[in-house]
Each structure stands twice: as C-alpha cells, then as structure tokens.
Amino acid sequence: MPLRRTAVFLAAAACVAASPSALGVRLPTTPRIPHDAAQAAKCGPDTGSLETPACEVVSTFDGGEVRSYGAGLLWATTRVEGSYSDASYQGFERCFAYISGTNDQNATIEMTGPVRIQPLDETSSTWKVSFFVPSKFTAGTVPQPTDPTMAIEAPASSYKAVYGPFGGFPGQSDYEADLKKLQASVAAAGIKLANDKDITYAGYSSPFTILGRHQEVWLDVAGPAVESA
C-alpha cells in the first residue's frame, strides 16, 4: 500500500470509514443491534463526540424508524467508478483529504458521521461517497474543495426510513441483505418510497473500532405511515 494511503488510514483511526472486510481481514464482530423503543427516543446511534446531522425521529415501524432531515445540511461528496471496495477506499481517501486541508481555505475540518456510500445505478458500478460537513459551516462559509472530483452538496429536506444500527464489519453483500429487509419492512408498514433509487449505506465507526460499531441502511421515503410515538 503506498505511503500516502497508509498515512490516510492511520489518521482515520478516530474517524468513520469503510469496511476492512474488502481487504480480507477477519476481525471479531459485534452482534446486530435490534431496533427498539429506546432507539426511537433519539435520532441516530450514539456516536459520542462525533457530530452527526440534525434530524428527528418522526415515527417507528416494525424493523426500523423514519427520520426527518431538514434542508441546509452540507455534504462533501465525490463519485467513484468501480466496485464497492473502490468506492469505500477511493471515496474515503478523497473526502478525508478535503477535511485535512485540500480546500480553498487550507482548513482542517472535524471528522463527522456518517460516511455515506450510495449506489448510483442498478449495476452498482457508480457510487457517491460523502462526509457530513459540520453544522458550524453554512453554504457561504464552507471551505470549497480544490480537488475537481469533490463537490459540496446541500440536499433538500427529506424523510429517511432507517434500518439499524447494526454492528460488525459489513461488506456490500451484507448491506444489500439489510436493504432487502428494510424494503420489506417499509412495504409491510405501508410507507411510500419517495425515490426507490435513493439508497444509502451509512457508517459511523472507525475501521479500528472492533466493538460497539454502528452502521445503517437508509431509504428515501415520502413520510411516516404512522403517528409519532
């Protein structure tokens, strides 16, 4: 592994990254964490001091919850052609370089969560990888990437149906299996998809974290099907 990439992943010890399973590394895993009523009382997994996007749990259903994410959230994004493994490593490396100073302000930006990996086509050959930009920045103050493969995006407000959090070191096949579970749960709950192409694999844990890992799968939905608890 080139020295630069080695340095990036050593520096990422306190950060969120993609699964090391793509490298064939077999590490102990934590059991999958079932959704329960306690999880609905907060928005997203417990990430300690790691900032995550502001959101609200608006309803729960058997197998997950629906969250509302407001407008104005900023994401540093890049697109990667290739496999899930390519997206995991190349996308993370570009985004990590951006927060490490590869921007027009030479600013070092705090690591946040989650790292989002999104398949952009049905063959999973094009991916979008994103880091959440800390909320202290606005569209007018956020450092702009100097890497032409990076961009700052500000999605519209949305509802997300969420499966998780779950532990372990999931690879693409694991995420796809959990996506099918979420799709089945959403259909059973009568929740309407807003965009069946908008799929997100969200990782909140450093690759060096063995226990207490947090990953999720998100689907873009039109809104909750039941009243908030």
Image: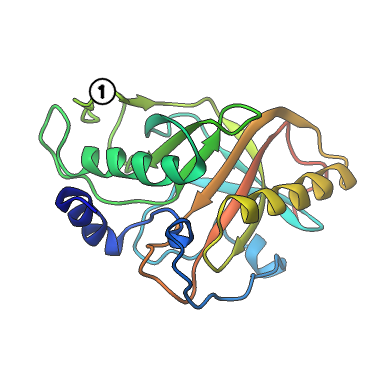
| Residue 194 left/right relative to 74 | right
Q: Secondary structure at mark 1?
A: loop
Q: Position of residue 149 (x, y in %)?
A: 30, 24
Q: Residue 60, position in %: x, y?
A: 75, 54
Judge from the rendering whether residue 91 lies leftward or rightward of residue 40; answer left or right.
left
The residue at the point 54 percent across, 31 percent down is: 125
The answer to whether one can see residue 43 in this image is no
Q: Quadrant of residue 93?
A: top left
- Quarter of the rendering occupied by the N terminus: bottom left
Q: Which residue is depicted at the point 72% across and 27% down?
A: 194
Specify the quadrant that holds the C terminus: bottom right
Per the image, the residue denoted by label 1 is: 140
How is the rendered protein coloured? rainbow
Q: Is residue 58 shown left or right of residue 126?
A: right
> Residue 91 appears at what percent x and percent y?
37, 39
Judge the density around disc 1: few (<14), some (14-19), many (≥20) Cα neighbours within 10 Å: few
